[in-house]
Image (spheres, rainbow, N blue to C red):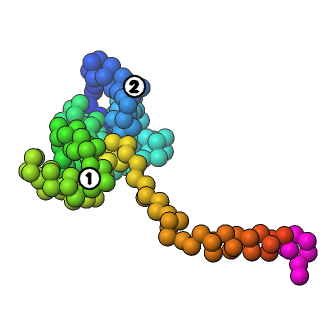
């Protein structure tokens, strides 16, 4: 049987606090596993109670025994680091506000001022996070139409609609 090693009073208080008040789900779940294990619940009991896999439960207990309180929190994850760090985001947003319709010029300006090479999609993701909205510009061809022919067509449509209302032919 695998149980967590005897917890001190400080550890119990910390785990209870983490279980009840931590804003993230995973540390709350891990604290609950450790508290139940401390009360001599077996891995099978915890598995049935929490719907977590046996492997998750046992690895949480092993991590707690190995590294202590830091076992509650997720380690660093793999993935590409941000191209535009948080410190530079405000400067980039100001560049976007200056010329919102031409992202290519914003990309060139970022290259010159911050020496960072970014793509349009990176800029668009940053804009989305900043709450900007992208809408296409509605283009009208009304200035190019033949007004006389347009008015005549409107009258014909009106006549056809009236004919339909009156029962056809």
Q: In this picture, is 80 found above or below 162? A: above
Q: Position of residue 153 (x, y in %)?
A: 68, 74
Front position in the image: 32 or 123: 123
Rendered residue at 41%/35% (across/down) = 41
Helix, strand or loop for disc 2: helix
Quarter occupied by residue 22:
top left
Image side of residue 43 versus residue 65, left or right? right
Instruction: Work out whether residue 21 can be spotted.
Output: yes
Q: Position of residue 128 (x, y in %)?
A: 35, 48
Image side of residue 94 versus residue 116, left or right? right
Rendered residue at 41%/48% (across/down) = 133
Quarter containing the C terminus:
bottom right
Residue bearing the label numbered 2 = 21
Q: How many numbered discs, if any?
A: 2
Rendered residue at 27%/37% (across/down) = 73
Residue bearing the label numbered 1 = 123
> Which residue is the extreme one toward the right?
167
Front position in the image: 30 or 55: 30
């Amino acid at each position: 049987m695998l149980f967590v090693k005897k917890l001190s009073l400080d550890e119990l208080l910390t785990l209870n606090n983490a279980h009840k008040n931590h804003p993230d789900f995973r540390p709350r779940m891990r604290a609950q596993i450790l508290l139940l294990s401390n009360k001599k619940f077996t891995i099978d009991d915890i598995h049935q109670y929490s719907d977590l896999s046996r492997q998750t439960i046992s690895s949480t207990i092993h991590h707690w025994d190995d590294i202590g309180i830091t076992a509650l929190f997720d380690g660093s994850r793999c993935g590409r680091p941000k191209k535009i760090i948080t410190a530079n985001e405000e400067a980039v947003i100001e560049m976007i506000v200056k010329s919102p319709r031409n992202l290519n010029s914003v990309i060139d300006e970022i290259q010159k001022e911050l020496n960072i090479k970014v793509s349009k999609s990176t800029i668009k993701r940053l804009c989305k996070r900043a709450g900007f909205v992208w809408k296409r510009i509605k283009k009208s061809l009304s200035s190019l139409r033949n007004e006389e022919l347009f008015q005549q067509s409107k009258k014909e449509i009106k006549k056809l609609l009236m004919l339909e209302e009156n029962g056809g032919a």
